[in-house]
Image: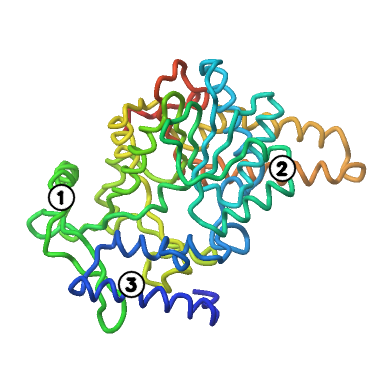
């Protein structure tokens, strides 16, 4: 690690580590990785997403698409404009965003929808991090006060359900996962965490994972020693939230693969990834509580979970194709034309803006950037029309 944690961070991590140690000791020296990840990320007041350190942005640990510029939110707004327009006119329309980060997406999204005269009746933000919730509220109060009458921070979707759109960008990858390892007999045994030489370390359970999950993995004939993850929490989240959608579309953006690619033989160590000060690595035991821990998304399992909640897969494709289908390049062309018509001396701001926008587009769409690693899946219920975001490509047949 290039910049070691400071004294305050080390002390913070030590408190959380002691709690995890106690859990291990009380459970005969072993806990599931699922439990470890849940505590490391979400332990009240101590987990990575529950504590107050900055997580997102240049001075945090990672960058998300909404922080690259306004184009990501603009494209999603155009897709939601289409969805709201196609819903019954007499219904109360709701946009629900899970895990709103800094709040920048919500602000840019509503500004764009406002320009299209298509604001929803309400915009719900469901945020588990008290620190991020405070940052979101400060941003909206400072830069988007005109939207305070429709934005509400809530703990959950109303039991009565909603009509509209549910958006989650980089949420599923942060939910706790089950880790497993294939033994010599071809059975998947759960990987958990123990204390070895006074440090957290991996330990394989003597118990096999549930039979329904064994059957899922058996079709891929994974070799002994193969390790990977199963996103049981992400699948459960889709089922529970999908049941609350009465009519509309759920749009999920995250990095991941269809199941056959997720459990490819070349991916022998799985997809577990950690982020600390913009450095990606694979050690989840590095100072718990001050680094992010993620796992890629099995989108085939997400589609199946949606089906369990009576949701229909409307589309699935790379982020690049989705955004380009929604007119991502239109603003680029407009700005570049303006820059060409004015020389650099006369309008340097236009040239600079054109360059910045071009870099944003590349990051969002190029296959070696976010364009292919990140995927978009849309799940709908009682929605009558196709989605423009999948005009250029729709790979739902690969799920």
Q: Nearer the viewer, residue 26 or 101?
A: 26
At horizontal 55% and vertical 76% (from top left) the residue drawn is: 3
Q: Which residue is mark 3?
A: 20
Which numbered tag is attached to residue 106?
none
Percent coordinates x, y for residue 183 in the rendering: 12, 60
Quadrant housing residue 38: bottom left
Q: Kindly check if marks 3 and 1 are in contact, taking CB atoms under 8 A apart as contact.
A: no
Q: Nearer the viewer, residue 375 or 243?
A: 243
Q: Secondary structure at mark 1?
A: loop
At horizontal 45% and vertical 62% (from top left) the residue drawn is: 292
Q: Which residue is mark 1?
A: 210
Q: Residues within 10 Å of mark 2 (few under 14, many from 20)?
A: some
Percent coordinates x, y for residue 258 in the rendering: 33, 39
Is residue 80 placed above or below 130 in the rendered structure?
above
Mark closest to the chain's N terminus, 1 or 2: 2
Disc 1/disc 2 C-alpha distance (Å): 48 Å
Q: Nearer the viewer, residue 88 or 313?
A: 88
Is residue 113 placed above or below 296 in the rendered structure?
above
Outermost left residue: 185
Q: Which residue is mark 2?
A: 144
Q: Secondary structure at mark 3?
A: helix
Disc 3/disc 2 C-alpha distance (Å): 41 Å
Left or right: residue 50 versus residue 143 is left
């Amino acid at each position: 690690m290039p910049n070691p944690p400071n004294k305050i961070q080390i002390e913070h991590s030590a408190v959380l580590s002691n709690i995890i140690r106690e859990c291990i000791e009380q459970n005969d020296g072993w806990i599931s990785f699922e439990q470890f990840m849940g505590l490391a990320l979400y332990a009240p007041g101590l987990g990575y997403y529950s504590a107050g350190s900055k997580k997102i942005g240049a001075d945090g640990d990672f960058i998300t698409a909404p922080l690259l510029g306004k184009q990501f939110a603009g494209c999603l707004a155009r897709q939601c404009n289409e969805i709201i327009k196609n819903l019954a006119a007499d219904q109360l329309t709701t946009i629900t965003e899970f895990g709103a980060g800094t709040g920048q997406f919500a602000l840019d999204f509503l500004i764009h929808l406002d320009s299209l005269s298509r604001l929803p009746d309400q915009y719900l933000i469901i945020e588990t991090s008290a620190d991020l919730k405070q940052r979101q509220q400060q941003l909206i109060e400072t830069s988007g006060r005109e939207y305070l009458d429709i934005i509400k921070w809530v703990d959950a979707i109303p039991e009565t359900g909603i009509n509209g759109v549910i958006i989650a960008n980089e949420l599923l990858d942060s939910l706790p996962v089950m880790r497993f390892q294939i033994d010599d007999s071809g059975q998947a045994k759960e990987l958990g965490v123990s204390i070895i030489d006074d440090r957290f370390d991996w330990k394989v359970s003597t118990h096999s994972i549930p039979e329904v999950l064994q059957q899922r993995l058996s079709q891929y004939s994974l070799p002994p020693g193969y390790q990977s993850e199963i996103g049981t929490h992400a699948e459960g989240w889709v089922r529970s939230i999908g049941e609350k959608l009465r009519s509309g579309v759920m749009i999920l953006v995250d990095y991941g693969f269809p199941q056959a690619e997720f459990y490819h033989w070349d991916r022998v160590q799985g997809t577990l990834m950690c982020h600390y000060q913009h450095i990606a690595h694979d050690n989840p035991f590095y100072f718990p509580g001050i680094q992010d821990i993620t796992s890629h998304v099995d989108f085939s399992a997400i589609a199946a979970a949606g089906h369990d909640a009576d949701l229909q897969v409307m589309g699935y494709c790379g982020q690049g194709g989705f955004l380009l289908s929604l007119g991502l390049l239109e603003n680029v062309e407009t700005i570049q034309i303006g820059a060409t018509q004015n020389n650099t001396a006369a309008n340097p701001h236009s040239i600079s803006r054109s360059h910045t926008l071009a870099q944003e587009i590349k990051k969002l769409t190029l296959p070696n950037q976010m364009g292919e690693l990140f995927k978009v899946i849309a799940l709908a219920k009682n929605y009558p029309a196709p989605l423009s975001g999948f005009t250029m490509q729709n790979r739902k047949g690969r799920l």
